[in-house]
Image: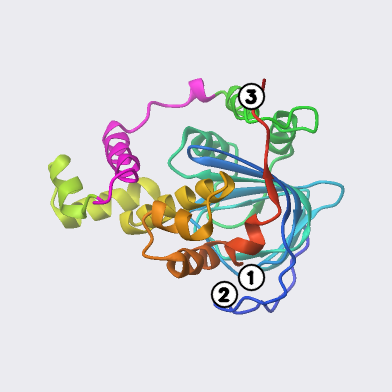
Amino acid sequence: MKKNAAVMPDAGTVSAMEMAWIGKMAMRPGIGLFRGEAGDNHRHKHWAHQLSIGIGAPVQLAADCGTMQAHALFIPANTAHQLMPGHMMSLYIDSTTDEARAIVSMMPASDRIIEAPAGLAAIVLASFGDDMPHERSFDTLRARLQLGALPARNARLDAVLQILHSSLDHENSPDRAAMAAALGMSGSRFSHWFREATGMPVRSYKKWLRLVRGIEQVLAGERLTDAAHGAGFSDQAHFTRTFVEMFGLSPSSALAQLGKMPRHR
């Protein structure tokens, strides 16, 4: 792995001449996959773990520790980075999912970007190979990760996650006090507990869920304006700002030339 000092663009600026991302994308609740040519992006961070695997050449990125290059790199959630353009496969995994728990258990203990184990990269490539580019490949991934062998899930966390996911279909999002009361906690204790259990503030996680919902709607053919409103953003500009903050480029550049992977027949 190669590490050198790197100077990165400001996260708040996006070039008007962005190189679009071209490839295929598939999403399931809590996990998304991109395969193709990654285009331009600026320094950013998002609330999902990311596993990027180079196809034909190593994947490269720039981060606080410098530049990094490897066959596969694991980027923990909320870690600032800039992905270099190239042909690759990337998984984006909500940190609350069983897939995330299984993948993290295969990593050396670290809160920094690290080279992913060859065995993990092989599992992902085998699940989403050229001969099997279907949404059912997520089931193959789950089987290969042996999710049934994981420790039991946190029942209280699952109850809160159910409330948060259900709220996406309603205009009124549950506030901290309501969720804290459901668990018999004070508001401050609930906030501390949620961050300890998930690694993120509950407000940030709610914003992440809304962004993912908007992406799903755009990929389903909705206009950006309609997708923004449907995901609970005040307008398209708010959705775009959030997307740039979390992915380092505009949603039009990121999604315009992405196709959905076909459903398995």
Q: Residue at x 64, y 78 (%)?
A: 9
Helix, strand or loop for disc 3: helix
Q: Amino acid at mark 2?
A: Ala
Q: Nearer the viewer, residue 237 or 122?
A: 237
For label 3, count other residues whose C-alpha is less than 10 Å away and answer few (under 14), some (14-19) or many (20+). some
Task: Describe residue 211's horizontal placement relative to residue 25 as left or right.
Answer: left
Query: Going from the N terminus, do you reach mark 1 or mark 3 first?
Result: 1
**Residues at marks 1 and 3 touching, judged by CB atoms closer than 8 Å:** no
For label 1, count other residues whose C-alpha is less than 10 Å away and answer few (under 14), some (14-19) or many (20+). many
Is residue 154 found inside the magenta-colored segment of the image? Answer: yes
Q: Residue at x 47, y 45 (%)?
A: 95
Q: Residue at x 64, y 70 (%)?
A: 42
The answer, for residue 80, to whether it is visible in the render is yes
> Which residue, given by chain and number where applicable, does mark 2 sit on?
11
Which quadrant of the figure contains the N terminus? bottom right
Q: CA distance from mark 1 to mark 3?
A: 32 Å
Picture disc at residue 42: 1
Q: CA distance from mark 3 to mark 2?
A: 36 Å
Is residue 60 found inside the magenta-colored segment of the image? Answer: no
Q: Nearer the viewer, residue 70 or 246?
A: 246
Q: Amino acid at mark 1?
A: His
Task: Describe residue 252's horizontal placement relative to residue 234 as left or right.
Answer: right
**Residues at marks 3 and 2 touching, judged by CB atoms closer than 8 Å:** no
> Which residue, given by chain and number where applicable, does mark 3 sit on?
140
For residue 135, what is the image quadrant? top right
Span of residues in magenta: 147-173
Helix, strand or loop for disc 1: loop
